[in-house]
Each structure stands twice: as C-alpha cells, then as structure tokens.
Image (cartoon, grey):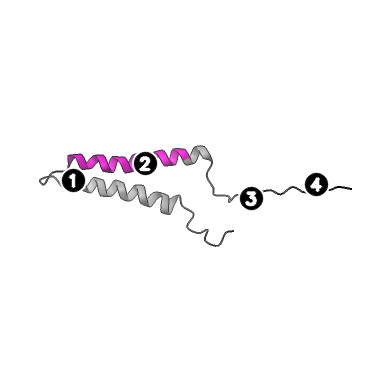
Amino acid sequence: MSSKTTTQVQTPQNENSLVTSIVLFVVMMALFLGSIYSLSFLTLGNPWPMAVCLGLFALAFWIPQTILGRSDSAGEH
C-alpha cells in the first residue's frame, strides 16, 4: 500500500501578496523619487526643498523598515 504524503509550505501570516507588495513598492519609490525631485528646487536662499527631501526620504526608508517590516521575525525558520 502506498500512502501519499503532502508537504505544505507554510508562509508567515503577515506576508504580503504580490499585488500588495507591488503597490507598496510603487508608493515607496514615489516617495524616494519625490525626495530627489525636490532637490531641483534647492537654492541657498530657500532651505525648504532640502527639508522636504529629508522628510520624504526618511518616510520612504522608515515606513518599510518599521510599519511594514517584519522586525519581530528574527527567530522564524
């Protein structure tokens, strides 16, 4: 008698689907590219484009690392 065994690969519960990952990538890339674009308005008399650049870049880096990241998954196998 032959018995069939199936192995299922279990993905973490907080893993995003492909569509969600693509949408998040596009949004974060838009923030990053917006921060670079804001530098085109930078002059010595107007520091606000640099402030906008730093803010958008910080958001593009911080959101995926903390809010969307899996920072608590160090022990998963």
Q: Earlier in the sequence, mark 3 or mark 1?
A: 3
**Labelled pair 2, 3 in contact (Cβ < 8 Å):** no
Q: Nearer the viewer, mark 3 or mark 1?
A: 3
Instruction: Name the residue located 42 percent from the left edge and 41 percent from the top edge.
Output: 25
Q: CA distance from mark 3 to mark 4?
A: 19 Å
Residue type indicated by callout 1: Trp
Give the residue pinned by disc 1: 48
Q: Could you say which is closer to the camera, residue 26 or residue 59? A: 26
Q: CA distance from mark 2 to mark 3?
A: 30 Å
Instruction: Name the residue located 86 percent from the left edge and 47 percent from the top edge.
Output: 2
Q: What percent of the width, then of the height, locates residue 15?
A: 54, 47
Residue 11 in the figure: left or right of residue 6: left
Q: Nearer the viewer, mark 1 or mark 2?
A: 2
Q: CA distance from mark 1 to mark 4?
A: 65 Å
Give the residue pinned by disc 2: 29
Q: What percent of the width, then of the height, locates residue 76?
A: 57, 59
Q: CA distance from mark 1 to mark 2?
A: 21 Å
Residue 56 in the figure: left or right of residue 69: left
Q: Earlier in the sequence, mark 1 or mark 4?
A: 4
Q: Nearer the viewer, mark 3 or mark 4?
A: 4
Give the residue pinned by disc 3: 10
Give the residue pinned by disc 4: 4
Q: Earlier in the sequence, mark 1 or mark 2?
A: 2
Rendered image quadrant of residue 42: top left
Which quadrant: the C terminus? bottom right
Q: Earlier in the sequence, mark 2 or mark 4?
A: 4
Rendered image quadrant of residue 24: top left
Find the magenta span and give its range.
Answer: 22-42
Helix, strand or loop at label 4? It is loop
